[in-house]
Amino acid sequence: MWLKELKDAAYDADDILDGFEAEVLRQQVESGKQVSFLSSLSPNQVLFNHEISKKMAAIRERLDDIAKDRDDFKLGELRDHAGQAEAVESQEFSSSLVDESCVFGREQDKEDVLEMLVADDSNQVGHGNVSALLIVGMAGLGKTTLAQLVYNDPRTGSHFDLKMWVHVSKDLGVRRIAREIMESASKGRQSELANWNMVQENLRGQLQGKRYLLVLDDVWNEDRNQWEQVFLPLMHGKRGSKILITAQNKKVANITDATSLYCLEGLSDQDCWLIFKRFAFANGNSSGHPRLEEIGKEIVSKIKGLPLAAKILGGLLYSKADEDSWRTILESEICELPPHNAKNIMSALRLSYQQLPAHLKQCFAYCSLFPKEHKFEKSKLIQMWIAHGFIRPQGRRPIEDVGSECFNNLLCRSFFQRVEESYFMHNMIHDLAQSVSLDECFKVCNGRMHKIAEKALHLSLVSDNLEPTVFSNLLKFRRLRTLLFLPDCKSAFDHIPEELFIKLKYLRVLDLSHNDIKDVPSSIGNLKHLRYLDVSYTSIAKLPETTGNLHNLQTLKLEACPVRELPKSITKLINLRHLKANAESISTVAGIGRLTFLDELVKFKVHKEGGHKIVELKDMSELQKIHISQLENVISREEAQKARLNDKKRLHILTLEWTYITRSNSIDELHGEVLEGLQPHINLRELSIWYNAGSRSPSWMRNHFLLNLEILCLRNCKNWEFLPSLGQLRFLRCLDISGMDGVKKVDHHFYGTEADGFPSLVELSFDEMPEWEEWSGTEGGQLFPSLQELLILSCPKLQRMPPLPSTLARLWIRKVGLVALPDLWGCRGIKPNSNSPSSLSSLEITECPKLTSLCDGFLQHNLRSLEKLTITDCPELVHSSEEGGLPALLSLKSLTMENCPKLTALLEDRLPLLAHLKIGGCPELRMRCLQNLTSLYSLSISDCLNISSLPEKTLFNLTALEELTVSGCRELAMLQFRALTSLKHLTVENCPKLKSSSLLPSSSLEYLEINNTPLAGLLHNLTSLLALRIHSCPQMTSFAEEEEELQKLTSLQSLHIYDCVNLQFLPAALYRLTSLERLYLQNCPQIQSLPENGLPGSLNMLDIRDCPILEDRCRKDAGPDWPKIAYIPKLDILTSGGSHAANKTEEMLELLASISSGPAVAEIGVYDSILY
């Protein structure tokens, strides 16, 4: 108790001192000069100082009483509650991603589970075509990791058509689970559906006919009725679909009808040791520490096969080389971790916490304010820590850098987990944070606050049902330092009462983001302790002028707000370090130079009037990033120098932008002089210069001054005649040059040497260089030894390029006047022979009108890594096997050749891995190149006018082909598909002479599209067909010849018929297609009626557009065909105008009045006019 009283007294003292400093800041802002504590002798100041003295005297008395109690009762330091028994729920946030380098000992488990997933389960009882497999085990054992390994195994990807991953957790409701499954199935493209029935129908539609794998990770829910609702749409997957579930409780197997159960066991000591040393030693290498290795193995023997504990304890000992630290862990009773007792995992976590320095304990405990599975934004969390003083400055180091080090320290100790660019906290770690935050941090998760101590310091609201009364309830927490309305917090209010910020005057962190709040009360100015304010993603359009009273404010965030102008008083925020708002609102601030601690200006617009001149930047020495625009308003080099960019040591990212102005000699000279005056500090990392009208680059670019530059972008500096000398910038890794109209030659001056240049450059692009004619290399040297990506675009006069490095991975050449491809240089600066390897994986050559041959340059080398090759719109390109051909492209997976009319041959018999081939506009190309492409998955042939047939011998070896498109082959008369046993998707377009297509593989084709081509037997025996699209067939008047074949499409689910302007009759036997669900009819104006026997009863959607006769016959309750469609749940009928669209207003009213009269119609589409 005495320790709690001590902390209370310390916090009160801190508030008093902070208030005193805030008063000093206020006086400093008002007077415009430094103010000492005793400088003011005004009556108000004397009274204020007297009040401060009285409060501090009272604090001293409390501290004396606390010290006396400690001595009287002989109280020792309060021990941590690590020994107390705790029930810990070990659910963890997960995604499908896994770092396999950190996984050991699960190889056999993975093989076992994989075997279960791909096994034939036709005799098992499950959910129809779907069966479930449950992985069960205790917390921390690695169930999720095992599921991730299985999910990412290539065999899983090839066996299943669709993979989905959903982390369930305890609190995820049935509807949320279904929506997350739906979102995972659509790869995040799913729109929000409010109607539960639509969610289930949508999900069913996405899974229909697909063999899928669904992982439900960390399942807790044991309500069978709820799970049955989830499983209903899942049952429509293709036979062999699997649901893989991970859970701690075996009862989940019964609830979910799992047909297989896999009980996961603990790891061996050897495998646990591999995990332990992976985290305990640098690079996982313990060979240099034999004593520590011995102690470590003893520690591992007490872990009892728990990989989570091995990871945590290994991370705890990372970088500790003294034996005492290791023996402390070894001899601790907390290391006794029976695998059946989850509470000991918490003990291990608490032990990790005990080893943290005091300031890291504060930082960690503060994280308990956020809900489980929260995605932490590193910079935001650090800013909050700084606002509370958890992070203290260290010498001259920026405090944000110190905070980043603290965060990384926690990350290294596994208190955070990184997934791609996001950070998460394991749920057990989150439980630990809650347990150590004592009575300081609280969350409101259900709208109730009665259990929260009135002396609470930090409060977050994550409830989804907050009422306006929440503010009156908050008023009693007068010591609050943090108030967070987190993104999941849904409120029923749009404003904040004035009284709130009068009562909660000690707030240091206030986050109102992601809410419907429309305004901030003027009482915000009462929060003199406030350091962090976030109102991003709200409807707030204006901040009150009292915002300027927040002199302690360090962070102000207004992202994605309709704020157009910031308050004038914002320049009084003299401690502001981070300002996040839209560029336009920031650019309106006059006198922003007073905010000398700002680290970023997203845009500073230079004006000629006061408050917006470039001199405002003079004292902003903490800037790390700035975009300066409208530099044409700087009138001289001397004025530009007043910005003192060369003094800004922390400035890493700089953009200098002029507004484009018609060229004149005076403007050219002025732009050049101003740019000279804007020389940045040598520490600059990224530089962009846009629309400078000077005649040459500045001297500080030409003399290698920017030694630390990593990224450089030069755009539309149209008068520069030469590129600056950049080749000796040893850290430059990305160079983007575009719109440099004056440049005609690039040579050794650009490289800065007669030999090598650009040692670290990885990405290089030239674009819109209309006058560039010459690009020469160097004598005997190697340029760009690290280059991986090169783009040369819109350089029509450039005919030759220097030799390229073998490191190049991507090359894109478009609209370039090349007469020959460049050569390749070896890794040692010598010209290679044809066997020299290249790293090139992607090559695209387009619109190069002078290129005649591929049989020269780098294409003659060993392109063993090339996976994608695209060559289009090269009218003079000629390549034939008689030329000697190209070397074998053994890794090529994608090849596109289009609009090369003189091309006669491809790379025959030398493309073993080719999966995607697209040929178009190559009338001279011989098709025998297709004969041996055994790996080909998709093939597109278009506008090859000389092809008259695709005989069986040409297609015989395409056994892997699933997608085929034939388009614009106007002489094509015959297709034969006997050998295409894997074909699923076929499109035939604009082949008017096609007369026969024999022996389509009846067991495989699922999608068929026919465009301006006779059906000619294409529908024969397609019993697996799921979707059929027929369009632009003007010769078709009916389906009389295809009637018999149509009746055999027993699997057909979707039928599209459109732009068949002479079609009069639909198939008479359409009603026999008992699997048909969707029918689309568009722009078929001659269709006389629906078939006499109607449509199939399975139909759930009918879409009719621009079919005026049919539309009239389908008028609701009035058209003769209405009874044939009244039962269909969704009807979308769009009129074509004219007489059919008359009296639209009356019909609209009639429709609205009659919607309820059709109980079978669930949805009616309304478009240009209403007919039903």
Image: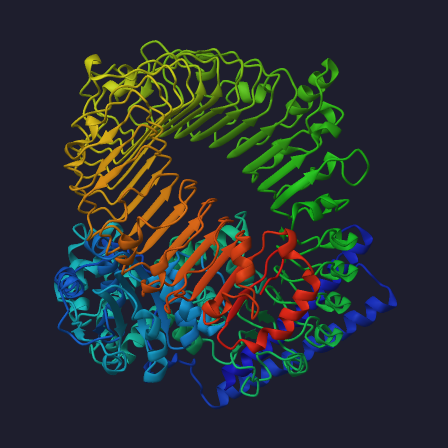
* Front residue (pair 320, 101): 101
Count of numbered labels shown in the rendering: 0
* Front residue (pair 486, 23): 486
* Front residue (pair 936, 680): 936
Asked if 357 appears above or below 1087 in the picture, the reply is below
Q: Residue 1066: x, y in percent?
A: 40, 55
Picture quadrant where residue 1069 is located: bottom left
State the residue at coordinates (25%, 26%): 838
In this rendering, would 391 be left or right of 315?
Answer: right
State the residue at coordinates (52%, 54%): 1105
Asked if 674 appears above or below 289 in the picture, the reply is above
Picture quadrant where residue 352 is located: bottom left
Applied colour scheme: rainbow
In this rendering, would 545 be left or right of 187?
Answer: right
Q: Residue furthest right?
A: 43
* Front residue (pair 602, 40): 602
Q: Residue 500: x, y in percent?
A: 70, 75
Residue 420 appears anywhere in the view: yes
State the residue at coordinates (77%, 66%): 522
State the residue at coordinates (53%, 70%): 488
The quadrant of the rendering that contains the C terminus is bottom right
Residue 529 appears anywhere in the view: no
Q: Residue 1083: x, y in percent?
A: 50, 48
Q: Residue 167: x, y in percent?
A: 35, 68
